[in-house]
Amino acid sequence: MTWTFHSYLAPTAVAAWLIGSCLALIRKPQKAGLFVLAGSLLTLVFIVGLWLTLGRPPLRTMGETRLWYSFFLSLAGLLAYARWKYPWLLVFAAVTASVFAVINVLKPELHSKALMPALISPYFVPHVTAYMLSYAVLAASALGAVIQFKMLTKSGKSDRKLYSFIDDTVGIGLGFLMLGLITGALWAKEAWGHYWSWDPKETWALITLAAFLGYLHFRLKPPRGFGEYVGLLLPPAGLIILLFTWLGVSLLPSAAGSIHVY
Amino acid sequence: MENDWKKELLLETRSGPRKLWTRPWGYGESFLFFGSVLSGGLAAEYAFGPLDLKVLAWPFNFFLALIISAWALLARLLKNRAPFKFLSSRPPAVALIVCIGFLSIIMGLVPQASLPYRAPPEPGLIGRLGLDHLTSSFPLIFIYFFLLIALGQTVILRASLKRPVFLLNHLGLWLLLIAAGLGAPDRQRELMVVPEGGLEWRTRQADGSFLEMPLAIRLLNFDIDEYPAKLAIVDHSSGQALTENGRLAVFQLDPAEPQGRLLDYDISLLEFLPRAAQLRPDLFTRAITQGTGQPAGQAAKLLAKNRYSGQSYQGWVSTGGLSYPPRPLPLGDRWLAMTKPEPRRFLSQVMVYTREGLELTAEIEVNKPLKAGDWLIYQHNYDTLAGKESLWSGFELVCDPWLPLAKTGFVLWALGSLGLIIFGQKKL
Ligand code: HEM
């Protein structure tokens, strides 16, 4: 199975994901789950087919890694939806997975095999995948925290079920965030000689970590009153810093000469 | 112990708003306490100027690690005494994490001077307070020290095998922070430049002098392994390469996938030479250029067939080498040409000799350092003008005696992260 085949498979998978999202929004959870699962399985079939054709695991090019993101994101969304029953979780995962699939159809020139030497490493895929998953899950926590914050300011009361959702997603997202950081550090040791160089990208990744770690420990002994408001601001602040770490670090004056800007 | 804090929580809930500095200390006291530590650090930096981390080098840092561990053990014996109880509770943990975040934000915004930091003759306030060299400044060192103490206590006081996720995360992070922080003054990084065929055992220092290393490197050969070039189509009249959807239209040559399409043409790769020599203008063969310092180009024999007119063109295309120009293949009023190849691997074939009598023959490349005794040898740079025929290779030599401890910490922490993902943060 080659990439030509992808131009037919991907739109079908995207259609399944989007129909699934709509079904979730109009509260048809079982059908929604089935459609999203179908999209994920189509992607998996293509990955396996490509693997057999190439005779190597399809992990080498950017296009190939995007296939895995699509697959894992949709699957993670499905599992989280089954556990938490929030439709927007499934919608979020399905739309993100679709974006990766659509990029693969529209930008075929990015199937390029020319990966620069520093990126050729067994840490590359786990590093990027862990960060992608943490982005997805922590975005959900941030959204939950904003809703909780609004509820608190309006009625002075917070929702316990929503708190347990935020706490759980922060735990899971933080787990992935730390795995991303750890694989990145071990990779840096192989590539640059040291696991932590206070490179701006590393520094901002640490700030992100501090925000969510702060929230987690805050919740272990929840403060009342003013402190509760401040605590709820940590996940959205963390998410903003996270996006900034990913996309914006290269714009900083302190990033001049950074080795991490690509 | 579990019940202790539940009781505390109950007490607090019952008694309503409480006064500052009544025990047990909570969030207000924690933030005031570590805020003072931070201010103290800034004041110390202002008063005593930049600190040379080398004063903490072996064996001093080892004793410090022992003291921190001893303190944590002492905490186990005297766990109900105020300083121990306070530092292993949750509010100071939050305050410490916030302080680390705060210092990192400064570090992320203010460009940091390279280390070792030497004060400029008339430093401004930012420099005097240590904000442009935070990693070796008093504020960060004070907070880091308290972090090591608090985390160590938390591990020893609160951890049990019944809470493996908690134990793995905190113990892993603690070991890592000890190795990374206290080990910093013992880390050594040197740059060594070795000529092809030559033997080198010295590294050049910032002041121009040479330092003898406990190992020597002989460079047998430096090479760049390139990806096969890409093909592009150039218009005769404009001299521009053609685009598709606003991007340069290219076809990545790949001997494993010889068939493909570029714009209107079906391309077949008939023969590919990663190092080509030109025999006649229209004939290429494998080149033997190793060690001559002369770059060889890539060449490919191609068949291009226009999908619409059915017309086919066959012949050689080359990137050009030192003794011959680039060669495109004419396609009517267009050219089929090669783009500049991109590097896949930078590699040095070396022999390494250590003082202990170790003798290694190996290839060193980016992402694949060589371990020789206590040292790791990294591919660092080369003569970029000569490219793959560079006559020298630069290596970075790194020695970090604390690395095994750091790696242990990373592994435990990674297992803890997995535990957090799989089991959640609720107690097991
Ligand atoms: C690697 C990053 C960290 C992770 C993933 C993490 C995670 C956790 C989790 C999940 C708990 C709750 C455990 C339970 O209730 O069973 C906890 C508790 C705690 N953590 Fe952390 N933590 C981290 C770093 C830190 C740091 C830097 C400190 C600072 C000193 C700290 C201090 C504490 C304290 C004091 C508790 C309460 C322990 C108790 O009273 O039982 N942690 N942490």
Image: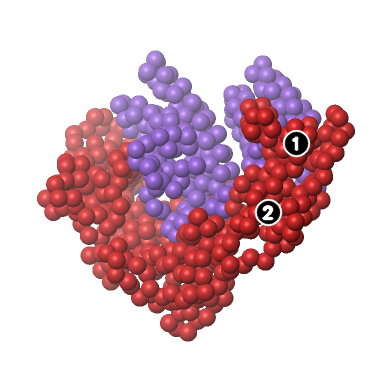
Chain colours: A purple, B red
Describe the element under mark 2 as helix, strand or loop.
Answer: strand
* In-image side of B362 versus A11 (left or right): left
Please determine whether, in this image, residue B2 is positioned above or below residue A219.
below
Q: List the residue tagged with mark 2.
A: B298
Q: List the residue tagged with mark 1.
A: B262
**Viewer-proximal residue among A185 and B299:** B299
In this rendering, the label closer to the viewer, 1 or 2: 2
Residue at x 84% of width, y 32% of height: B307
Please determine whether, in this image, residue B422 is positioned above or below residue A86.
below
Q: Which amino acid type is marked by label 1? A: Leu
Residue at x 56% of width, y 44% of height: A128
- Residue B287 point in image, percent of width and height: 69, 63
Residue at x 34% of width, y 41% of height: A254
Residue B283 falls in which quadrant of the image?
Answer: bottom right
- Looking at the image, which residue sits at the far bottom? B357
Describe the element under mark 1 as helix, strand or loop.
Answer: strand
- Residue A89 point in image, percent of width and height: 59, 27
Is residue B238 something that shows in the picture? yes
Q: Which amino acid type is marked by label 2? A: Gln
Badge 1 and badge 2 in a common chain: yes
- Looking at the image, which residue sits at the far right? B310
- Residue A98 point in image, percent of width and height: 66, 29
Dot 1 or dot 2, earlier in sequence: 1
Residue at x 64% of width, y 18% of height: A25
- Residue B56 point in image, percent of width and height: 25, 64
**Residues under labels 1 and 2: Cα distance?**
19 Å
Which chain letter matches label 1?
A: B
- Looking at the image, which residue sits at the far left? B47
* In-image side of A126 versus B155 (left or right): right
Which chain letter matches label 2?
A: B
